[in-house]
Amino acid sequence: MILAFVLAALLLAFAAFAAFGVPYLVMGTRAFEEFGERADAQAMLAALSVAAGLVAGLPLAGDALISAGPQMQVFAETILGVPERVWS
């Protein structure tokens, strides 16, 4: 889980650098002068913000994603309507 969290954070940081850091390094402050008018830059910032929020919530959701085998079997039988003889 820690490896997934670190990898997600690194990939998110690289995406943010590629989207906003490289234009700033090339053009300086002019890269953000028309930020209010550029819908593509605003969409990229919104997507990166949502991804950062999801990465921050990853440790909280990790416990909910891990469940024991018998619980999943009951879930599968309930949802799919599969008889018990299939699983034994």
Image (cartoon, grey):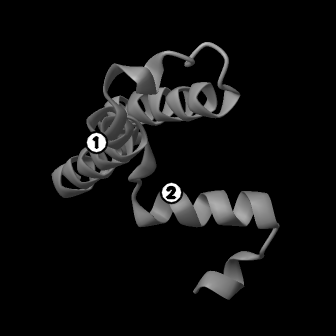
Q: Secondary structure at mark 2?
A: helix
The tag on residue 71 is 2
Q: Position of residue 39 (x, y in %)?
A: 69, 27
- Residue nearest the viewer, comparing 72 with 54: 54
Tell me which amino acid carries mark 2.
Gln
How crowded pointer 2 is (Cα within 10 Å; few <14, some 14-19, many 20+) is rated as few
Q: Which residue is mark 1?
A: 13
Quadrant position of residue 78: bottom right
Q: Residue at x 67, y 65 (%)?
A: 76
Given contact means CB atoms under 8 Å apart, are the residues at marks 2 and 1 in contact?
no
First in sequence: mark 2 vs mark 1? 1
Quarter of the image containing the C terminus?
bottom right
Q: Amino acid at mark 1?
A: Ala
- In the picture, measured across the screen, residue 74 lies left or right of residue 7, that is right
Above or below, comparing residue 35 to residue 86 in the picture: above
Q: Secondary structure at mark 1?
A: helix
Nearer to us in this view, 57 or 71: 57
